[in-house]
């Protein structure tokens, strides 16, 4: 009886295991089939998401134009930052070489100045003394000139000694040097000694602008005493601005004299200006960067020294697959282009293809497709791509509403 019961238990256990195995197999098969169906449905849904249909009227309203991929010569670029600057000869610091009190000035920052224009009137007793010394020395020079001529004639006639003649000559040369020195000092403070007489002596002198330009700094006011070392005004000539770019050490080897540069102001991204590398610095700064000096192709009076700029340095030129920039649209952080897939009568079918965008130049952008496509026959929407994107998203929203 015990043996019979054991046999029954074993049979029951084996049957249970068999049924469990069959159940698991059936469940697994169902899950696999469901997974395959879901995957198929997702692929179909994805295909639907990337397609957009247009009627003839919609096609015309979107102003779509078709084009093929072209081979274009576009430049690889290096993105850098920099500022607008002026060469040293175009930035002038004006001071009063002999010091003095500011008697008058009408300068304000931003005022346009012409070369030779009066910047300020200064006054000081030392100006009077300097002019007085000049008149005194010049008078003595005239006397010593006459004395020298007289002694020269007497020496030729052997009437006076050579020693007397040499002394007269020495006195004349010394006085000429003193007068010349005073003339130069007076020229420094803006006094022209041509036809200068005792009637021209004044306690005031004028400070003149040495260049054309704009006033960038005013550091004085009326009545202020100015030391010779103090900067009264700064004048900048903005007609010869250049771009001073910051290029990091690892990229310097890519640069060459003559490379083209395209740059924009931070608030003018749609307006590019052109420049050309003129000098490459030979010193690496503490931040491991090198200064690169570039000359503008066209002078621009709208630019000011110190303006921050974003620049693209064109490193070299390559033949690449390119399309008009309007061909590529951005969605969810990715780039896409629309391919004409089919044309049924007056209806059009477009497929959205993901692309990678490369160099952009002269209205064209380099592109490469994420998935392999036949480039020779492909037709892309080179105009109206944004309308296709909008149509596709509107269709998705309507489908989602159902």
Image: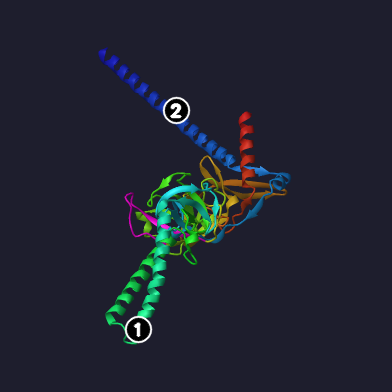
Q: Is residue 279 left or right of residue 322?
A: left
The quadrant of the rendering that contains the C terminus is top right
Residue closest to the far front: 159
Q: How is the image coloured?
A: rainbow
Q: Position of residue 325 (x, y in %)?
A: 58, 52
Q: Which mark is residue 154?
A: 1
Position above or below: 249 against 150: above
Task: In this rendered view, identify the residue nearer to me: 79 or 294.
Answer: 294
Find out whether the residues at labels 2 and 1 contact each other: C-beta distance under 8 Å.
no
Q: Position of residue 141 (x, y in %)?
A: 39, 70
Evaluate whether residue 157 shows in this view: yes
- Is 8 contained in the magenta span? no
Label 2 vs 1, first from the N-terminus: 2
Q: Determine the secondary structure under disc 2.
A: helix
Task: In this rendered view, identify the residue nearer to me: 274 or 76.
Answer: 274
Position above or below: 268 against 145: above
Residue drawn where x is 47% and y is 47% of the image: 218
Task: In this rendered view, identify the residue nearer to me: 80 or 324.
Answer: 80
Evaluate whether residue 256 shows in this view: no
Foreground tag (2 vs 1): 1
Q: Determine the secondary structure under disc 1.
A: helix
- Is 295 contained in the magenta span? yes
**Distance from Cα at disc 2 to Cα at disc 1:** 141 Å
List the residue tagged with mark 2: 27
Give the magenta-colored segment's residue range.
Answer: 279-296
Q: Position of residue 144 (x, y in %)?
A: 37, 73
């Amino acid at each position: 009886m015990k043996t019979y019961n054991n046999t029954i238990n074993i049979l029951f256990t084996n049957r249970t295991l068999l049924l469990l195995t069959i159940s698991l197999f059936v469940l697994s098969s169902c899950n696999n089939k469901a997974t395959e169906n879901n995957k198929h449905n997702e692929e179909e849904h994805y295909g639907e998401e990337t397609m957009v249909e247009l009627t003839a009227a919609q096609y015309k309203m979107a102003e779509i134009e078709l084009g093929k991929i072209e081979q274009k010569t576009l430049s690889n670029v290096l993105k850098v930052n920099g500022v607008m600057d002026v060469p040293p000869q175009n930035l002038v610091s004006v001071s009063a070489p002999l010091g003095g009190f500011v008697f008058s000035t009408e300068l304000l920052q931003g005022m346009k100045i012409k070369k030779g224009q009066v910047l300020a009137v200064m006054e000081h007793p030392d100006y009077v003394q300097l002019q007085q010394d000049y008149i005194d020395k010049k008078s003595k020079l005239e006397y010593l000139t006459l004395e020298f001529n007289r002694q020269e004639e007497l020496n030729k006639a052997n009437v006076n000694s050579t020693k007397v003649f040499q002394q007269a000559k020495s006195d004349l040369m010394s006085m000429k040097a003193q007068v010349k020195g005073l003339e130069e000092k007076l020229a420094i403070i803006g006094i022209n000694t041509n036809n200068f007489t005792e009637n021209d002596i004044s306690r005031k002198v004028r400070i003149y602008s040495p260049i054309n330009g704009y006033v960038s700094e005013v550091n004085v006011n009326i009545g202020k005493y100015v030391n010779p070392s103090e900067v009264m005004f700064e004048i900048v000539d903005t007609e010869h601005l250049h771009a001073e770019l910051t290029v990091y050490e690892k990229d310097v080897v890519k640069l060459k004299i003559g490379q083209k540069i395209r740059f924009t102001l931070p608030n003018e991204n749609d307006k590019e200006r052109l420049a050309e590398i003129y000098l490459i610095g030979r010193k690496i700064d503490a931040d491991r960067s090198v200064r690169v000096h570039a000359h503008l192709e066209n002078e621009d009076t709208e630019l000011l020294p110190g303006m921050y700029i974003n620049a693209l340095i064109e490193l070299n030129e390559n033949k690449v697959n390119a399309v008009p920039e309007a061909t590529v649209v951005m969605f969810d952080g990715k780039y896409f282009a629309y391919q004409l897939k089919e044309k049924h009568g007056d209806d059009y079918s477009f497929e959205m293809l993901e692309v990678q965008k490369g160099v952009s130049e002269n209205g064209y952008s380099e592109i490469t497709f994420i998935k392999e496509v036949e480039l020779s026959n492909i037709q892309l929407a080179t105009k109206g791509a944004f309308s296709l994107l909008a149509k596709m998203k509107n269709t998705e929203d309507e489908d989602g509403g159902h």
